[in-house]
Image (spheres, rainbow, N blue to C red):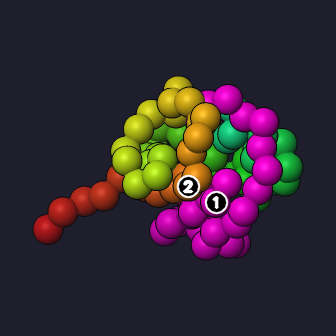
Amino acid sequence: MDILYFAWVRERIGLPRETIQTEAATVADLVAELCAREDRYAAAFADVTALRVALDQELTGFDAPLAGVREVAFFPPMTGG
């Protein structure tokens, strides 16, 4: 599964993207798995209410299942102008 990080999430983790193998059932499970890896992930995901997530380029919630998903993207909320 490809994971993409945008804006300050990318800055805290230090990567724009990575490919991982996971047994996570939901986005929340994936976040917990990533946070357990290293402190930089824990810092990036410390407040998931400040984040949005997209699965295969479709906005979704952190309770969404990951079965069959190829790409997960994490980013802060967008502002228009």
Point out the residue furthest to the left here. Answer: 81
* Mark identifier at residue 72: none
User: Residue at the spot x=18%, y=63% of the render?
Assistant: 80
Magenta stretch bounds = 1-28
C-alpha gap between disc 2 and disc 1: 5 Å
Q: Quadrant of the C terminus?
A: bottom left
Q: Residue beneath label 2, please?
A: 71
**For residue 60: magenta?**
no
**For residue 26: magenta?**
yes
Between discs 2 and 1, the one toward the N terminus? 1
Q: Are marks 2 and 1 in contact (CB under 8 Å)?
A: yes
On the question of residue 15 being in view, the answer is yes
Q: Quadrant of the N terminus?
A: bottom right
Q: Residue beneath label 1, please?
A: 2
Q: Is residue 15 above or below residue 53?
A: below
User: Residue at the spot x=84%, y=53% of the render?
Assistant: 38
Q: Position of residue 67 (x, y in %)?
A: 61, 35
- The answer to whether residue 58 is left or right of residue 26 is left
